[in-house]
Amino acid sequence: MDCECLAGCPFFNDLMTSMPSSTELIKKTYCLKDWAHCARYVVFKHKGRQAVPLDLFPTQIDRVGEILK
C-alpha cells in the first residue's frame, strides 16, 4: 500500500523534481514501503498537512519531536 500523501506531497512533487535519482530511492523506501516511519507522514498524522515543514526530509525523524511540541 502506498502512502496516502504521495500524490499531493509537495516534497516530491515540487522540491525534489531536480533530483530524480534521490527522489526515486526515497520514494521506494518511504512512500511505497515504510511510510509510517517517514518524518513528513508522522507530522501530517499528528498535526495535519499545514504543520509539515517544506524542508523536512522523510529521513529526518529526529526533527519530529521538536515539530510536534
Image: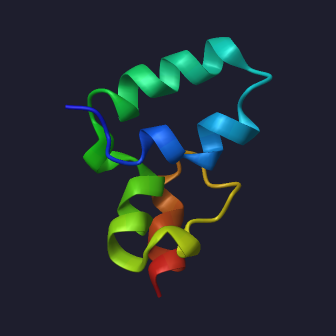
In the image, taking residue 3 as reference, residue 17 lies left or right, namely right
Whether 51 is drawn above or below 60: the answer is below
Which quarter of the figure has residue 31? top left
Residue 29 vs residue 63: left or right? left
Foreground residue among 68 and 48: 48
Q: Is residue 56 above or below residue 20?
A: below
Q: Residue at 74% x, 20% y: name it.
A: 19
Q: Nearer the viewer, residue 26 or 44?
A: 44
- Residue at 47 percent of width and 88 percent of height: 69
- Residue lying at the far top of the rendered structure: 21
Q: Quadrant of residue 1?
A: top left
Residue drawn at x 44%, y 54% is 39
Give the vertical position of 25 relative to 53 (above or below): above
How far from the left and from the top, in percent, is residue 50? 57, 73
- Residue 59 visible here: no
In the image, residue 9 lies at what x, y percent? 54, 46
Q: Position of residue 12 (x, y in %)?
A: 61, 36
